[in-house]
Amino acid sequence: MDKFKTLEPLKLYSPPASASPIRKATVAPQFVGKLPSDLHLLILSYLPVPDFPAYARCSHATAALAESEKLWETRWKSLKMDNKGLGVVLNDLEEHSKGRAAESRAAAPPTITVDDEFGDFASVDVPPDEMGDFVGAFQNPTTPMSASLWTNNFKSTSTFRGQYIRVHNLLKPLTKTLLSPAHIILNDLAAAVTPSLRSEASTLRLLFLFLSQSIQPVRKWREYRTALRSAMDRFDANLLAAFDNADERGDENGMREAAESSWLVWDGADSDWEMGKVWAEKREIFYDQPWDPLANFTKDRQLAFDAMDDFMTIVLNAISEHGSRAVRVFPAEAGVLISFSERVASDVVGEYISTVLTRAREISLDIFLKATAASFREAWKMVDTIMSAGGTSTSRTKAEDVVFRMFEPNMDEYLDEETEVVKPTFEAICKGWDQQASERHNNLGDVSARFLTSHNPSQVKRNVLASFTSVLLLPVTIVPRTVGAVGGALVSGGTAVGGAAAQGIAMLNPQRWGGAGGGGWGISNVPEGYQKHRGQGNETMFEIGSDEDDEDEQEEKEKAEVFDEKHGGLSLAPPPSAAPLSAGTLHTASTSLDQMDQMDTLLSLDVALELIHTSRESLKRLETFAAYPDRIGDRVRDTIEEVFILMLQALGDGHVKRGFSRATARMTSYKPAEHEETTSVAPLLQFFELVHIGDTIQSMVQVYFDKEMAPHIDKTDFLNSVVREKKRFENSLDDSVAGGLNAGTEVLMNQVEHIILKLTEPREYYPPENAALDLKPSKGCTEAIKCLEMHCKLLKGSTSKEVLEVFHQEVGIRLIAILQKHIKRQIISLTGGFQVIADLNAYHAFISSLKVPSITADFAHLKMLGHVYVVEDAKDLAQIVRDVTRYGGAYRPEDIYEFIQRRSDWKKIEKTVDKTMYNLSFKEDCIVC
């Protein structure tokens, strides 16, 4: 029983956490003496190597800390053995050290080996200075344990400590001569390694890293390091002389050996490597400069960059020749090619461009903008040449930075001037058209063909946009040259690409939209607005420059040629089913204006094209700098967006909105009674022409946005300033069209009412009893429907389906009001009632063709209303009036009562109708007091 232990009671429930909180176990810091071991290691990381033995003799703990791998790993990595291949130097030093030790043993006198009971002591042959300061600290025989600190693992190089001890033993003897003159230091170091420039340079570099603050191998390391730096400078000077001699002989192997050795001994403290800098300064391109920057300007103060082509050819040849040699001779990490290219860019190309831009600014700002973009495009050729010379060892980003840094001083001024020049140019284009329009309206006899007289306005619009797209595909010349220099860069309208441009311009000319023949899209009749974009000899407004070697521009040219082949004549021949509108209708409308201006001159595709062309020229110049990084790149992108926004504002507020406002004001002043009775409303016809032009302008802006602006912005970002401004432009155009249509609807319905009043005979609905019954619609009804039908058809294809539906609905609502008012003015007999029904049926058929359900139902109810004039029996008529469901709730009995009062027999049937409707008679049941 004594072997059994008493059972402890079980704890069914653990105590609450608050009663006995659980604490995480923490590792207690290890202390050496009264200080933690981490603090000891921190102190040892700053301790010179000669003080390590003294620290290690304090205790076993300090001896263990002195052997910590963390300490020796830091010192080993400070030597950078792997970066520049310095490990070979250690092997070389070790071989020479063993050779000298063997020679010294061979020269020593012979000794007699004595064996005794204590063993062979003579077998230990360790030089007394092998460990330098280490061994000097271990001469006290009472500290055998401390001495073993530095002898353990001495031969092992698997640890960082063992590797460092090997380096220390090999480099420590070399410090003895460092306080000697520089030439003696170099001679002694040369004797310690294999005689070659690279070996000597590697030894100097390794010894320089060894004598550093992070290692502190000896107590006088600072004095030794200063003396060694002086010796390295002298060695570098000798290398520079050897490099120059090899350069004069054309010995690239000798140049390469001297350059690599100089790169090893260079400490990187100076901003530039001396050897690479001196080599670059001796290139003749910095001194032999036979070019004249002002030769890029012609006698008529225009740009012709043929001289700059020749200049850049010299520069590119120099970079290619000398840059290729720099890559072969100098170390890749030295970056001599980039530094040489930067020197060429700043001292040669930069000075040349600065002179050109200064002269260009003196001539005009327009010339300055063109010269800036052209100069950058020419300088950009250096990038490809640098990459070709450097090969895979050169980063394209660094090559591009050469040009970016060289040109950056000019960018702020250029970006400021780009927007300052474009804005007044846009305003001048709009004001110029306004002045031309005011002069043009005096010649009322010149009625040009327009959208409205074409066989198919939608097809005309598609062809206009197709031609406009082909014009956008043509590259804009950034670098101007003379015609002879590029072999006809300014092509005439007869060539493939030039033909597409000429046809595009002719197509965009409103005076060429006639529907008479649909062909003949030549450029002989291009108006003055387009002629100013063309040079002499039928050159097109977009210069085709062969100087652009970019693949993108070549693809654009090919696309333009394919487009020209596909749409050779851009003929507007109508499809067989197309029903052309009469040109005489528009002529009649125009000649009926009398003193009113022609509103179709208020908007112009010529102005839109000119604004877009000006914006595109600026955009193409800015695209030259689109690759700029950092701040300048952000400014370039902002300027691209700003130019497009300025174009939209000029086109929207300065031209489109202003034109529609004037058109609306003129329409409201139109009085139908002051003009001839006609089925056409002249101002409304011209307003429909404006709607077609406005819709085409909006489509042109959309095409321009998709092809030119979309690559620079995120189209889905609704907060982007360009997207917002474009939306504002579209809304402004829609509002202008809607406001004009509202006024136009008012004018149209006034004209319809005027036609109905003038062409309706006095007894149209109360014919004589013996008159022949003709159930055809009356002349007033027929002409009113013709007027409405023509204007509704003209609006199709020029606006959105929603706007068109609203217009049709407004026409229907106002027409009902006019017809109700017209009926209430008439006296209608039973025979005339059939004429009323015939007219109402005609109006209903017209409204049904508009396919607007709401107003179609209203006219169906109005048509049913005509039946009250053909019912003979008064009681039946009263029942019809009381039947509210008969008219779908559109008319109350009181409303029908007003219409039947226009019957010619109303006085006869009034009593019967009243009694039947209200079951009373006013004369019998009402007493007047």
Image (cartoon, rainbow, N blue to C red):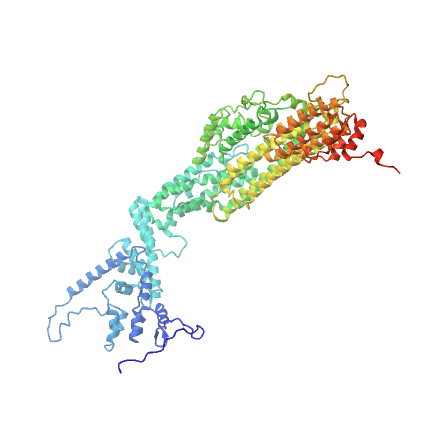
> Could one spot residue 371 in this view of the protein?
no
> Could one spot residue 262 in this view of the protein?
yes
Image location (x, y in percent) of residue 189? 27, 59
**Residue 383 horizontal side relative to residue 83, left or right:** right
Examine the rendered structure and indicate whether residue 51 appears above or below residue 750.
Answer: below
Query: Which residue is at the front of the view, 708 or 357?
Result: 708
Q: Furthest-bottom residue in view? A: 2
**Quadrant placement of the N terminus:** bottom left
Query: Which residue is at the front of the view, 678 or 280?
Result: 678
Residue at image point 53% right, 35% down: 703
Image location (x, y in percent) of residue 802? 60, 35
Examine the rendered structure and indicate whether residue 753 appears above or below residue 27.
Answer: above
Residue at image point 72% right, 18% down: 773
**Quadrant placement of the C terminus:** top right
Examine the rendered structure and indicate whether residue 174 appears above or below residue 396.
Answer: below
Q: Furthest-right residue in view? A: 929
Residue 403 sits in which quadrant?
Answer: top left
Image location (x, y in percent) of residue 258? 31, 50
Image location (x, y in percent) of residue 741? 66, 33
Label total for image? 0
Residue 85 sits in which quadrant?
Answer: bottom left
Query: Which residue is at the front of the view, 481 or 738?
Result: 738
Residue 99 sits in which quadrant?
Answer: bottom left
